[in-house]
Amino acid sequence: MNLAITIFVAIIFASIIGTVLQQNQPYNDYIIKFGPFWHEVFLAIGLYNVYGAIWFLILLIFLVLSTSVCVYRNAPVMLRDMKQFRLNVKEKSLRLMSNSQSWTTSKNLEEVEKNLQYYLKLKGFRVRVKEHEDHKVIAGMKGAWNRSGYIFTHVGIIIICIGAYLDGSFGLTIKEWTGRIIPETRDIRADEVPDTARLKPGDSISFRGSISLPEGSSSNLVFLNIRDGYLVQELPFAIELKDFRIKHYASGMPKSFESDLVIHDDRLEKPLEQTISVNHPLIYRGYALYQASFGDGGSNLSLLAWPFFSKKIQTLEVNVSVNKKRSLNTLAGKYTLEIDDFKMFNIFPNSKEEKAVTGKRFKNFGPSFTFKMRDASGVANEYHNYMLPVTQNERRFFLTGMRSSVAEPFRYLHIPADKDDSLNRFMAFHALLYDQAKVKRIAEASVKAAMSDANKIDEKLQADVVTSMMRLLTLFNQGGYAAIDEDIKKKVPKDQQVNVAQAYVKILHNLLQNTYLDMLKEEGLNTKKGVSAEDSFFFEDAITALAGIGAYGSPVYFQLAEFKHRESSGIQITLHPGQNIFYLGCLMLIVGIFMMFYISYQRVWLILKLEGEKLNIIFAGSGNRNQRDFAEEFKKLAAKVEEFTS
Amino acid sequence: MSVPNEFMRSEIQPSFIKQLNLFDWFFAVLLVVGSIYAFQKYSNLMDAYEVGILFGTAISLIAVGWIWKPARALMFYVALISLFAINLYGTDLASAENNFFLKFLFSAQSAIMWMSALFVMATVAYFIELFSGNAFTGKVATAMTWSATAMGFIGLLVRWRETYLHGIDIGHIPVSNLYEVFILFAIITALIYLYYEKLYETRSLGAFVLLVITAAVAFLLWYHFEKDASEIKPLVPALQSYWMKIHVPANFVGYGGFALAAMIGVAYIIKDAALKRNPDGLVASRLPSLDMMDDIMHKSIALGFAFFTIATVLGAMWAAEAWGGYWSWDPKETWALIVWLNYAAWLHMRLMKGLRGTPLAWWAVIGLFVTLFAFLGVNMFLAGLHSYGEL
């Protein structure tokens, strides 16, 4: 009994550890968190997988053993309580009971006995009578099922543990201990996984694994995660994913995840087609297939590569699929393009203000893809590009996010879209800034115009201004404002830096503006009367974007032109033969609990003893549940019994 | 068996069914007719399990109403007012702003505000009753608690309808997030308390029990005003299941029972200390006997434990359907097990070892903190599958 409580407490503490310390994470995370020493200690005592640890198994075995011993010891007592009326009860022990009364009557014994029997039956008692030498015992009992509640609950717990043992991972743990299996930790193709990490159908009585199936593919394998590795479990049938769908609510939140599966099995006359979704698994031959997750299954993307840092606009069409790599020759050398993911929808919650305007809780930014650009030395930056321009402050931008490590958030470059929602104008402006000859002509013209206004024609000064303009532009093209800032810090005394910076920015903007105006003229716009608000916003946005290109880290911008979406569905596959045993145990536990709490087990005894003319009656009772209630009930019962027997 | 004498004949008690009067039968028929109507009208939206739950609920409500007669009045008023409010709504959600009754009384939001106000007022009234001994104040407190409970139920039922007015595919039973289940917690705890209040004919525990309900209401209001939590949102796919309709309410009968037991535990500890210091003092004389409190504490833990067991098993069955395994050692599951083991040990010590008194009262109070962590803490501090009630 006390052992049971001790085991309860031990399980409670083990469970708390298992929830506070995140289980089955990559070992590196633990090393970072706890340091190498404690990592080794925690690993050794199994704290990373508490519920699979051998000491936890021993704890559960102890629970089962202790409960079994309790049942073995107490069940006979309970069964006896249900059957035996204790008709040999002694007068003395009745008097010692806490609910006990006695009185005398002059009534006839037979009549009293008959009435008592009748009355107790009326009150729901089963009644037995036994004649002794000098007295009679009448015993009553009701709510005997209460006693079996004990048996039900305890046997229920044992059965639950047996079911859970069958479905747990202990079979695998033992196989691993004896060295029959060794989990694979390398990231290799399934057919390259050695036999030591492969399980045939029937090798394990239960398992829980998952597989990610791209649309149109099929597989008969499941991966079982074991700590920092995995095992490959073969299935006796193959699963094909025909289609995966996400349905959305009007607000944009996902409403359902569905996979159209086809089961191919030699046992079947024709393949079995079934759609599974969350909460609606398919159970086939005892194997249960669940909709667990989803991802990209290798969508085909056709990208348009726009080169930066060049006066020629030469786009290149690149066709790649997700999870594939591809090498690219760029002006800045050889790069590897690695496509990591494609997303059809990017749904974000609207802020309160946006909600007030649009009336919607979510906004959708449309398709996007993430990729890495790895240079020849192996250093890579990660990018996140949206396919369609996104509206911000009533202007449209192509968003492209960049980060150099996974730990950072993406920083987004906002490239303004032109009237046709295309990149053409921005890229034209960008290319123009690299056309040294053309920009120089523009610079010269603008300097000449500015100086002729002041009636000072100094050719050398003009040439100097143009040179410094071109120098500033080169700096700006290379690294934006930061590059100019750095240049100033290097060359200008500290006390003049602010003034010089202001002058530089003015000169640079002058040049940029004139270049932009030149481009507008070439587009055929009349700029004499000034520029429209739209075009001037575009200029500002373009400058901001251009200033960021230097730090962008990629010599090209990838625009997503077209895509063929191919999804994959994460399917969890389990074999749990102990499930129904587990449920049976649960049912017994619940039935037992209700029997124990809500059936009142009561017994009463009456000893009738003739002493001369008088009849002595002793009435006593006991109830195992709610002593207080029973005491009340007994008092009432005794009062009645006394009333009609005296 | 021979014919008993006259006296005995008067003792013959008719069976439970025979004791029911015409009104009891009328009540049952009304419920059956109501559920048949609901079935006919909405069966196209229900799967077989949900039809089972509909009629199962009707049968359970009949049983509750027959065993605990005052519950019938509650059901009657809740049904009447909810239907009234739903009728006022029609098919237009905007009625909540235009219609007087909806705007100020019976839209889900208003009803829940009324519930909150009434619970707080009831708490104050119970405290006044406790210290002054004024019987009338006590009656007012009880009436307020009943009204608050009714308003809570009306709020949830009308909200259920409102979810459907947001869109037929958005509609769901309002026990899907922390905001909604806090309402459920408050009214179920209040109901269990009201049952024992009548059974034991004492109002002096009301102040303690309503304190925990007021705490829940305070959280609810903070959650509503700070986090905009009362907004109706569609269900994530994992929650779209008939299991939610039975798993969640069963759980909250459990939580309610445990909360009630803990608050009575507090009263028990106070009374015990007061008795030692001054047996004739105000506190010692106003609170019920230790014996009675021990008894109610035990009964409400037993009730909570029984329903918590059912809820956990239902949860396991749901998990088997949604997550691919009836037990995954997910933090929520694990903490449910911890709560279960805790109260199993409590009951074990009482039933088998005969432990009584202050230790058990303290244990019940600590149990509430364990339960609270399982209910709230897991969602706040631990990651897991069961993260529907995030703050």
Image: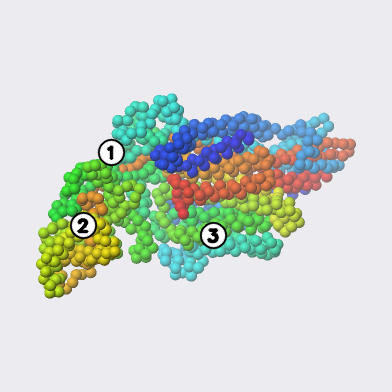
Tell me residue A115's x, y (percent): 77, 41
Disc 3 residue type (three-letter): Ala
Q: Quadrant of the N terminus of chain B?
A: top right
Q: How is the image coloured?
A: rainbow
Marked residue nearer the N-terminal end (2 or 1): 1
Tell me residue B259's x, y (percent): 59, 51
Separation (CA) of disc 2 from disc 1: 52 Å
Residue nearest the viewer, comparing A614 with A442: A442
**Label 3 CA crowd tier, 10 Å (few <14, some 14–19, many 20+):** some
The answer to whether residue A599 of the structure is visible from this angle is yes
Q: Residue at x 71, y 46 (%)?
A: A628
Separation (CA) of disc 3 from disc 1: 54 Å
**Front tag of 3 and 1:** 3
Q: In which quarter of the view is residue A2 placed?
A: top right
Q: List the residue tagged with mark 2.
A: A475
Q: Residue at x 15, y 59 (%)?
A: A432
**Label 2 CA crowd tier, 10 Å (few <14, some 14–19, many 20+):** some
Tell me residue B10's x, y (percent): 74, 49
* Numbered mark located on residue B218 in the image: 3
**Label 1 CA crowd tier, 10 Å (few <14, some 14–19, many 20+):** some
Q: Residue at x 73, y 33 (%)?
A: A86
Q: List the residue tagged with mark 1.
A: A217
Looking at the rendered structure, the secondary structure element under dot 1 is: loop
Looking at the rendered structure, the secondary structure element under dot 3 is: helix
Looking at the rendered structure, the secondary structure element under dot 2 is: helix
Q: Residue at x 13, y 66 (%)?
A: A462
Disc 2 residue type (three-letter): Leu
Disc 1 residue type (three-letter): Ser
Q: Callout 2: residue from which chain?
A: A
* Numbered mark located on residue B147 in the image: none
